[in-house]
Amino acid sequence: MSKPVVMIECWAVVENVTSQSFEALHPGNRLMGYALGHATLPNTKLIYTSPIVKIDLSQRLVETFNTIYRLGDPSEDYKSWVQKRTVAA
């Protein structure tokens, strides 16, 4: 059975659902954001995904255990966090 593809907007990456800080987009971390087009969740519901298992940035796809997420725009806070890390590196 193939996994559903769901759009996620205003997203960020966290280690787990209780994390107070952002993380890099890597397997094992989770996406949080607003799911659009999910079969069992209403649109614009804030979600935390299961752990990331695969990332395809060329297609803007992030795969978790149950779902493939098409990345929309990240949250402004997450974009700022990424930008600060890039400048510091």
Image (cartoon, rainbow, N blue to C red):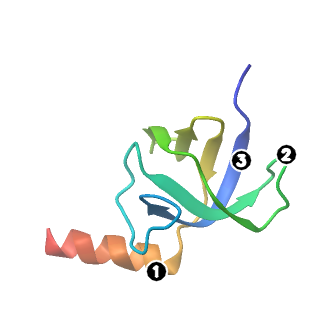
Question: How far is disc 3 from disc 1 in space, using C-alphas?
Answer: 22 Å
Which mark is drawn over residue 6? 3
Secondary structure, mark 1, is helix
Does residue 84 sit above or below 43 in this rendering? below
Label 1 crowd (10 A; few <14 / some 14-19 / many >=20): few
Question: How far is disc 2 from disc 1 in space, using C-alphas?
Answer: 28 Å
Q: Is residue 19 left or right of residue 49?
A: left
Amino acid at dot 3: Val
Which numbered disc, 3 or 2, marks the residue that appears first in the sequence?
3
Which numbered disc, 3 or 1, marks the residue that appears first in the sequence?
3
Does residue 15 sit above or below 2 in this rendering? below
Q: Which residue in the structure is indicated by mark 1? A: 77
Label 2 crowd (10 A; few <14 / some 14-19 / many >=20): few
Residue 28 image-quadrant placement: top left
Question: How far is disc 3 from disc 2 in space, using C-alphas?
Answer: 9 Å
Which mark is drawn over residue 58? none
- Which residue is located at x 85 percent, y 48 percent? 40
Which numbered disc, 2 or 1, marks the residue that appears first in the sequence?
2
Amino acid at dot 2: Ala
- Which residue is located at x 62 percent, y 48 percent? 70
Q: Which residue in the structure is indicated by mark 2? A: 39
Amino acid at dot 1: Asp
Label 3 crowd (10 A; few <14 / some 14-19 / many >=20): some
Dots 3, 1 in contact, CB < 8 A: no
Q: Is residue 41 left or right of residue 73?
A: right
Secondary structure, mark 2, is loop
